[in-house]
Image (tube, helix red, strand yellow):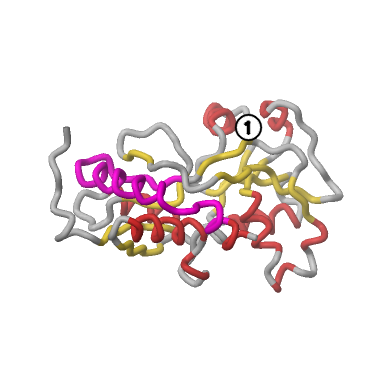
Amino acid sequence: MLSPVNFAAADTLYLTSLHWPPFSGEQLKHQGACIAIAKAALGAVGHSLEVDFYPWSRAVRMASRNDAKYLGYLPEYRYPTDKFVFSEPMGRSALGLVERKSHPISWIEQKDLNQYTIGVVEDYVNTAELDAMMVNGSQSFEAVASDLHNINKVLTGRIDAAVIDEHVLRYILSQPNMQSVKHKLQFNKKRLISKELFIAFKNNQQGQLWRERFNQGLAKINVQAILAEHIE
């Protein structure tokens, strides 16, 4: 059994995140859907949450450091790791491909994507199969720093399609600066996978205890209602 930690002295959880609207973002309402859920869950068990925002790779790196105040990061898909343990899910979203309406891509199995050049965001988790094909060289891909960069590359035909979350694509295309071009893009009719979103807690005693606290709070709130309020 894990020994208890004095939560009265450590009642604020510190996490890192990134600008990934509508799920997270410093300027978003309640800092985005996932952070709103996390704050509500911790509030339900008497604790608070402070989130600092960084570019994605740095957010993960900062949450990994033993000398940092952070005990994890969000949002994240579940993936094999010894560094982190994952919370109960904060919701589910579809991962798919953004493409030009004039140049839709056709595939049945993910290996069929090998004939196309696919855009990904650096250090994002995609699907296990797609990531493996990129590692072994069978999948042509280009990695960039943001979803918006990928969308612009799809628009200009530099890549055939890009991996993106369905709600993230919808949010980006709803922005004023995309109104003149959004009609040229669409979400490929076949989804890659439906993925759950988690907090990745540092795999140590404090991280595991905060995960337990968070999960207790998550069970007390209406996750779907909060999610719907922030992503629709």
Quadrant of residue 104 in the image? Answer: top right
As drawn, the residue found furthest toward the front would be 220
Q: Would you say the magenta stretch is mainly helix, strand or loop?
A: helix
Counting other residues with Cα less than 10 Å from the Cα at mark 1, is it few (<14), some (14-19), or many (20 or more)? many
Q: Position of residue 108 (x, y in %)?
A: 75, 27
Work out whether residue 93 or residue 144 is closer to the camera in this orientation and state it: 93
Question: Which residue corresponds to mark 1?
Answer: 139
In percent of the image, x 41 and y 41: which residue is there? 88
Quadrant of residue 41 in the image? Answer: bottom left
Q: Position of residue 195 (x, y in %)?
A: 56, 40
Q: Is residue 14 magenta?
A: no
Work out whether residue 74 or residue 131 is closer to the camera in this orientation and state it: 74
Work out whether residue 230 or residue 148 is closer to the camera in this orientation and state it: 230
Work out whether residue 46 or residue 204 is closer to the camera in this orientation and state it: 46
In percent of the image, x 46 and y 43: which residue is there? 89
In percent of the image, x 31 and y 45: which residue is there? 211
Quadrant of the snapshot with the C terminus: bottom right
Query: Number of marks in the image?
Result: 1
Quadrant of the snapshot with the N terminus: top left
- Residue 114 vs residue 1: left or right? right
Residue 127 in the image: above or below residue 199: above
Q: Position of residue 116 (x, y in %)?
A: 72, 37
Q: Magenta residues, as a range?
A: 198-227
Q: Secondary structure at mark 1?
A: loop
Q: Mark 1 is on which residue type?
A: Gln
In percent of the image, x 41 and y 60: which residue is there? 40
Q: Is residue 221 magenta?
A: yes
Q: Position of residue 72 (x, y in %)?
A: 32, 50
Residue 210 in the image: above or below residue 135: below
